Image: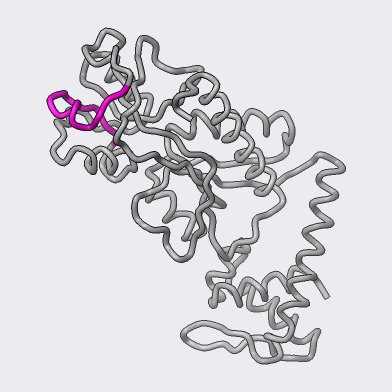
Amino acid sequence: MRVERARYFLAAVETGSLRAAAERCGISQPTLGQQISLLEEELDVVVLTRSRTGVRPTPAGQGLLESMSRLVAAEDAVLEAAAQSSNSYSGRVAIGTISVVAGTVIAPVVGRLRDLHPDLRFTVREGGSTEIESQVAAGELDFGVVTTPRRPAPSSIERTILLRFPLGVVMPRGHLLADRGSLRWEDLETWPIVTMREGTVMWEHLHAGLPRPDVVVEATSARTMKLMVASGAGIGVLGPFETTVDVPGLRWVPLHDAHSVSIELVQRRDSRPSPSALVVKRLITAQAAELLASTINRHPERA
């Protein structure tokens, strides 16, 4: 029996749809249906009940789920061991992320992947956290790295915390607030604010802390925010992270009464990441830990 047919069967059971299973497996729906029919011929048993509302396992199919899962897991383990022994991961991994994470977490990982696994290809798509989560839920991305939206996660995805960070105010070093050890939301009420665009987590936190902020610029990236602040457009609300391409001449002051923000990895609850996706996930987790450690070392009061 061909293992990929067991994989197609499991995908159909988990998604409840031949169309969704075909999308997850990267094949056409007719091909997936044909392969499951061949599986049924090989086993001489009907494993799926098909209807207009989707598919579900027959009693016989239900009884085969555990064995099929072990079979697929065994093949994955063999492929993982082979890839590790030859150091040759391949395929394509699609990652979604927000702009500040793209620079501080994803970019260093991409560089390592080019050195460690030159045959692995990847797509990095930037967007808002809510947008990225929707694309992960739809199966368009293998996983996302986002700042956690204030609303609960959709039932189809799971969030894993990579790190937490405090919010603060970024401003030119000569600004009247720059010498403060910390600030409160009320200290920002009379100042023009540069923020991320509506729909982002930073926008949500700003409007939760300041019901009527004097927003003068809504930027599409953290770097654009910092450039606007450096040019004198206003002050911005951001995390404390720095990058090698950061904007000089700015100071970050923590917001004492602001809630901390989490950077989290999100993926579908019913997904089975490929070996290539797993190695990317491990590198991202390690880079997030390095970022947190370096930030604490630079600013121990922010831990």
* Colouring mode (rainbow / by chain / secondary structure / one colour): one colour
Q: Depth check: give the residue in front, 260 or 147.
A: 260
* Rendering quarter of residue 14: bottom right
At 54% from the left and 77% from the top, the residue drawn is 16
Q: How many callouts does the rendering have? A: 0
Residue 165 left/right relative to 195? right
* Rendering quarter of residue 61: bottom right
Does the magenta segment cover residue 52?
no
Q: Quadrant of the N terminus?
A: bottom right
Does the magenta segment cover residue 193?
yes
At 47% from the left and 84% from the top, the residue drawn is 53
At 56% from the left and 83% from the top, the residue drawn is 55
Residue 190 left/right relative to 170? left
Q: Position of residue 114 (x, y in %)?
A: 68, 31
Residue 33 left/right relative to 98? right
* Rendering quarter of residue 26: bottom right
Q: Position of residue 75 (x, y in %)?
A: 81, 62
Q: Position of residue 83 (x, y in %)?
A: 81, 46
Q: Position of residue 296 (x, y in %)?
A: 52, 25
Q: Is residue 159 above or below residue 39?
A: above
Residue 157 left/right relative to 257? right
Q: Which residues are magenta?
A: 182-196
At 39% from the left and 30% from the top, the residue drawn is 239
